[in-house]
Image (cartoon, rainbow, N blue to C red):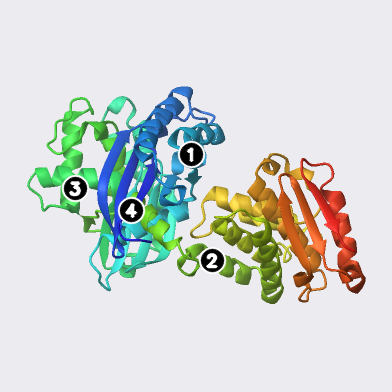
Amino acid sequence: MQNGTRLAAVDLGSNSFRLEIGRYEFGHIQRVEYLKETVRQGNGLDEDRNLTRDAMERGWACLARFGERLAGFPRAQVRAVATQTLREARNREEFLSRGSEVLGYPIDVVSGPEEARLIYQGVARLLPQSDERRLVVDIGGRSTELILGEQFTPHAVASFRVGSVAWSQRYFSNGEFSPQAFLAAEIAAKAVLDEALATFRPDAWDIAYGSSGTAGAVGDILSAAGGSPGLITRDGLNWLRERLLRAQSADRLRLDGLKEERRAVIGGGISVLRAVFDLLDIHEMHVAQGALRQGALYDLLDREQPGTDLRTATVQGLMQRFGVDMEHADRVARTACTLFDQAAPPGSERASRKLDWAARLHEIGCRISHSDYHRHGAYILDNTDAAGFAVPELHRLGVLVQGQRGKVRKLGVELGDPIFVLQLLCLRLAVALCHARREPDSKGLSLQADGQRFRVSARPGWAIAYPQSAHLLREEVQAWQKTPWELAVDMP
């Protein structure tokens, strides 16, 4: 990464969408511009957990404005991350398809634990270096993330479906505040968060930090009332609750430091924050400057090189957890990537890295069933929490793993992506060539791509020397016949 490089992160939160633009300088990212719009998508989920048309239109309009500001940014220098509302929405693909188009960049839906990891990275990068054990709490619109960590390393992450928007809708309908509503909201929040006690107990951390919307809003209000800047205390929360009860409704609430956009969700946010304080025995919490969007920016830096890409370590961890044959996985990965690099267009290094991960994970399902390991492998990747990966990335790896054997046409719509098709072909060829679980003579083979036609060429005598491999390659030709793609094998 060159000094002066501009990076951008888009955070599609349940309450607000945010755009952070920074400039990389000597290992750090300096803010250049910050935009925020209150979209309240979290309010737009109907009873069937579908985003309403109005909620989608609000989101698309905001993303179109962000997209205009991002025009000209290289794709590798922008990361757009969606959180709980789009994790829940049944019709999220409709929103994401149009949203990615108007923004001009793909939008990644991240899992709760991955959101927590990115939040911690954002918080840690903007804090002074120290050996303190940190508890980070991020109360968003529809989820709350808890993280334990030291320096830049998160040791425990968790995400819970409780947040300021959801709790305001459920317990403070019409913006009305009452003692009964606060009691019910706090009891319900504790019930959801109760399982956090075992991991996030008071003796596991030294200092508590609050990140993002609710913590920032409460910190601003308490500071405007004469409290220590950037500090949230139990007494401060009790005072704030009393002010809300005195006002009786959000419309009548008058507090210095309270932004208008936060008024509608302040009741839910305070009730969840009070529940966290009580449950985890927090006496004071410092308001952190970093958040998810800064974590996404620094994650772009880490992804720049294979050696610092967390996803590589995550793949190794999954291989160990599921007892993958490391030597064979490495063999298949090297063979697949060698073929891919021969036929791929320039600038396909990231796609090659993802093919490498899929190849290393292609037997991840063997521990469940040997005969259907490709299907079980795809299921595992679709349903696991893997640090560094967005949900669509894991799904894409899962589709490759599922497609390594059997009929190609079963993958349907995925076959419209030329890079994916090349990845799939190379994985299938590598699995076939490594069938004997020993190093194949892949130096005698070459792969070429011409439009929708692929050709595998072998040196003279290769098919005679390796008759079973040659047979498998001919069968692979048959597997592609009922697809828009054509495979030919030249084995003189």
Residue type at mark 4?
Answer: Gln
Give the residue type at disc 2.
Thr
Helix, strand or loop at label 2? It is helix
Q: Residues within 10 Å of mark 1 (few under 14, many from 20)?
A: many
Reading the chain from its start, which is encountered first: label 4 or label 2?
4
Q: To which residue does mark 2 refer?
A: 312
N-terminal-most mark, 3 or 1: 1
Question: Label 4: which residue?
Answer: 294
In the rendered structure, the answer to whether residue 489 lies left or right of residue 334 reads right
Disc nearer the start of the sequence (4/1): 1
Residue appearing at x 43%, y 45% in the figure: 80
Mark toward the start of the polypeptide (2 vs 1): 1
Q: Is residue 437 left or right of residue 155?
A: right
Mark 2 vs mark 1: in front = 2
- The residue at which mark 1 appears reads as 86
Name the secondary structure under disc 1: helix
